[in-house]
Image (spheres, rainbow, N blue to C red):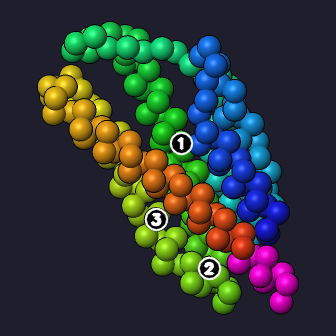
Amino acid sequence: MASALNKIFWGTLLVFLDFHINHFDIFPDFLGYLFIYLGLAGLVSYSNHFSKAKLYVLLLAVVSVPLIYQFEVTFVGQPQLTTTTFLLMGMFTVITLIHLGFVYHLMRGLLEITQEVSFQPLEKKTDHLLRFYIILTVSSQIIPLFIFILPEVALLPIILVLAIVSFIVEIMLLVLIRQFRSKSLEQDMN
């Protein structure tokens, strides 16, 4: 279990790191999703949710391949309603919802693992983080829809707060995966 959780941790970290040189992602997300997939394969015997999460990760890996090249999108003044704008917003919404499906099943599988005695202290933390992650993800998909309605002065602080909170929640997810790995190592030693 510890090895599988370690792969999920490092894969999630690779996806989380977003560094570009000349618009090319130097840590391609599909490599992170490959690590996550391999980790989930090692956890399938603990919960059916890990099998479901594998399907989402496979989709994410495929969809992320064209995203190795980062398109530059700049807005000067009020954003224009163009086909490209709608396509980009739609694409990122779909990717975010697929990612939410992955996180949901990953954390539901982790919740099933918390039924074991040594993992019970992580149950409440996992449940709270899952609920907050869902609310945050749905909110982050609804608020940008107001980009065409609200003035930039009102929308920018909201988007900034959502970005900061999303960053913190992703780090909390990484910490949680690491805590499960530590508990698994403790259990193996006993």
Which image quarter: residue 150? top left
Q: Residue at x 42, y 15 (%)?
A: 73
Q: Residue at x 55, y 59 (%)?
A: 173
Q: Earlier in the sequence, mark 2 or mark 3?
A: 2
The disc placed on residue 98 is 1
Vertical relation: 45 (above or below) 141: below
Circle 2 or circle 3, nearest the eye: 3
Looking at the picture, how far across and down is residue 135, in whole percent? 35, 55
Does the residue at mark 3 contact the one at mark 1 (Cβ under 8 Å)? no
Which amino acid does the dot numbered 3 rest on? Leu
User: What residue is shown with label 2?
Assistant: 114
Could you give the CA–CA distance between mark 2 and mark 3, rounded to whole angstroms? 14 Å
The disc placed on residue 70 is none
Which image quarter: residue 185? bottom right
Q: Residue at x 76, y 59 (%)?
A: 6
Looking at the picture, how far across and down is residue 186, in whole percent? 77, 82
Q: Quadrant of the C terminus?
A: bottom right
Could you give the CA–CA distance between mark 1 and mark 2, rounded to whole angstroms? 24 Å
Instruction: Report helix, strand or loop for mark 3.
Output: helix
Which amino acid does the dot numbered 1 rest on? Ile
Q: Which residue range is magenta in the image?
A: 183-190
Instruction: Report helix, strand or loop for mark 2.
Output: loop
Does the residue at mark 2 contact the one at mark 3 (Cβ under 8 Å)? no
Which amino acid does the dot numbered 2 rest on? Thr
Of residue 10 and residue 65, the one placed in the foreground of this image is 10
Instruction: Report helix, strand or loop for mark 1.
Output: helix
| Number of marks present in the image shown | 3
User: What residue is shown with label 3?
Assistant: 129
Vertical relation: 101 (above or below) 154: below
